[in-house]
Each structure stands twice: as structure tokens, then as C-alpha cells.
Amino acid sequence: MKTYNETLYDAYSQEFVVDKVYFEQKTDHQHLIIFDNAKFGRVMALDGVIQTTEADEFIYHEMLTHVPILTHGHVKRVLIIGGGDGGILREVCKHDGIEHITQVEIDQQVIAMCKAYLPKHSAGAYDDPRVSIVIDDGAHFVRQHQHTYDLIISDSTDPIGPGDALFTSDFYADCKSCLSEGGILVAQNGVAYMQLDEVTTTAKRLQPYFAEQTFYCAAIPTYVGGVMTFAWASDNKKLLDVSVEQIQQRLQLANIQCRYYNAAIHKASFALPQYIINALIEDC
Ligand code: SAM
């Protein structure tokens, strides 16, 4: 029986039974594998770290998109950093009011192989006429940016390898300079119970640039260890006052069917476990 062991943590790992390998190769940037598992369906991993699975990807992709989009209320231009599997792009494209989406992905092979072997993730979103794909390091792209965006979504790997550049102060400062007035930056920021230092480090690096910096969270089964935190940063301190009723109205207007996200979950996701709050008070 072939198995795949995640190597994200030194003293702990999760193991998947591999029923079939669809693709495995060292790309120019990272080791990429896509395989089948009876419980989670098709699974994609990069450099030994589980990135996404067919079975539970909806939680992560709905939360990292609809929360900022429905909070903001009139997002027109979106920048996605990373997100090569296409799940974030799929959910962003569901919002008809969005006029332009740029996705900056460092590894062309991830896009190509996920289109081929994880087709339900992008579900045709790469063909949306509003979408332009740039193959580049996201840190380089925001440093020399030409446009502004109402929303930046950093859907990166963990801060190891190519992903490391997307967790730096310089990257956050450059994202700030790419945002329109009152724009929002959200970013995947690891599983707090397992990577608590990533939460406090991100808070310290974001806070000098944004008036409102916090986190929201959701538990995604294959990001093992409890809730994943999503970093939130904006200069518009009123955004988070949006009511559940307003979110519900906007969701109904958007006419989007979700499997995890709803207005109550949206609001509740900003309630953080006390151990995260304590760490932020102690370290920041
Ligand atoms: N949902 C996953 C998670 O939470 O870990 C992330 C999914 S997505 C596959 C991560 C993407 O970030 C990959 O396609 C990877 O190639 C891309 N990436 C890593 N570093 C990057 C960088 N510096 N610039 C642009 N894309 C990058």
C-alpha cells in the first residue's frame, strides 16, 4: 500500500493512502504531486505539504473570497497571489459585479496540472473573460505594480520555499501601495494551533501599514490541527462593523450558493480562540 506523508511539521505528520498518482514532478520551483485518496478524493501537495483536496477545498476557498468581497460590498478589481489550483479564482468569478481579476502564480506547472487533474477546482474559471493570468513571483509583481486593486487575496503556500516572500514586511507594504482607498488584503496564515508564531509574526508585520489588522478563521480538515487563520488588513476601520443582515442581503443579491459560507459563519469567523488573542496581546 502506497502512502503519502505530509512533512510540514518535524514531530508530527498526517498520512494519506495513495490509490493512484496522476502527476509527480519537480517543477522549476517545487515538488508537485497530485494523487487519489479514498477519503479526500484528489489531493495536491507541494514540497511535502498538503495544498488542497477535492473533498474539503470548498471551506477554504469560500472563506478566503466571500468574506472580504461581501464585507467590502463593491469590489471591482481583484488581485490573487498564488492560487494555482484555481479554487480561489472559481469563487471570485461567481461575483458578477467584479470587473477584472489578475492572478499572479509563480509556477505554470501548478496551473497546468491542476487544470488537467483537479478540474473541479477551477471549473472553467480560467476561461472567464475578466481573468488575466501572470506567471511571476507575487512579491515581484506587487513591487513593480501598475494598477490598484480593491481586494488582494494571497493564497500562497506556507512561508517556506517560494512562499516565504509572501509573508514579509516588504510584501505587505507593496500590497498596501497596490490597494485602492479602503481596499482589503486577506491571506492564508496557517493553522494557529500548529503555527502560532506565524500569526503573531504576520500581525507585527502588517500592523505598521494598516489601520485595521486582525484575523478570521475556519477549520479545514486537511489543514490538520484546528482552525486555519486568515489575515485581514484594511485602512477602512468601519468595514468590520457590517451587520449579519447586510451580509445576508449582499449574499442573496450575489445569488451565490455555498456549502460552508453563510452570513452567520462570516460574522462568527472573526471571533478568535482565546489562545490566539493571548498570543497577539503578548507578542504585539
Ligand atoms: N490553499 C493552500 C494553502 O492554504 O496552503 C494554497 C494553495 S495554492 C496551491 C498555493 C500556490 O502558491 C501554489 O500554486 C504556489 O505555486 C504559489 N506560490 C508560492 N509562492 C509564490 C510566489 N512567491 N508568488 C506567486 N505564487 C506563489
Image (spheres, grey):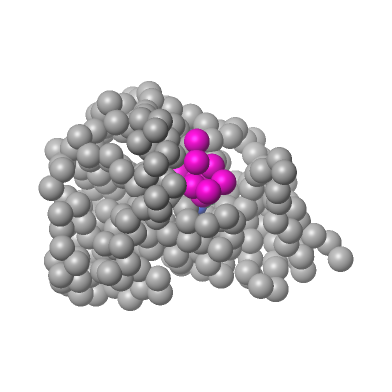
Name above or below for residue 114 compared with residue 40. Answer: above
Q: Position of residue 38 (x, y in %)?
A: 70, 73
Q: Is residue 128 left or right of residue 147?
A: right
In magenta, the rendered stretch is 186-197
Q: Residue furthest right?
A: 1
Q: Can you say which quadrant of the picture contains the N terminus?
A: bottom right
Q: In front: 271, or 158? A: 271
Q: Can you say which quadrant of the picture contains the C terminus?
A: top left
Residue plotted at (74% across, 53% down): 5
Residue plotted at (21% across, 56% down): 71
Q: Position of residue 24 (x, y in %)?
A: 73, 51
Q: Quadrant of residue 16?
A: bottom right
Residue plotted at (38% across, 25% down): 169
Name above or below for residue 255 compared with residue 146. Answer: below
Q: Is residue 106 visible?
A: no
Indicate whether residue 262 is drawn in magenta: no
Name above or below for residue 53 compared with residue 188. Answer: below
Q: In front: 103, or 189? A: 189
Q: Is residue 259 left or right of residue 263?
A: right
Q: Is residue 195 visible?
A: yes
Q: Position of residue 95 (x, y in %)?
A: 26, 63
Q: How many marks?
A: 0
Q: Position of residue 64 (x, y in %)?
A: 37, 55
Residue plotted at (16% across, 50% down): 239
Q: Quadrant of residue 94?
A: bottom left
Name above or below for residue 61 compared with residue 146. Answer: below
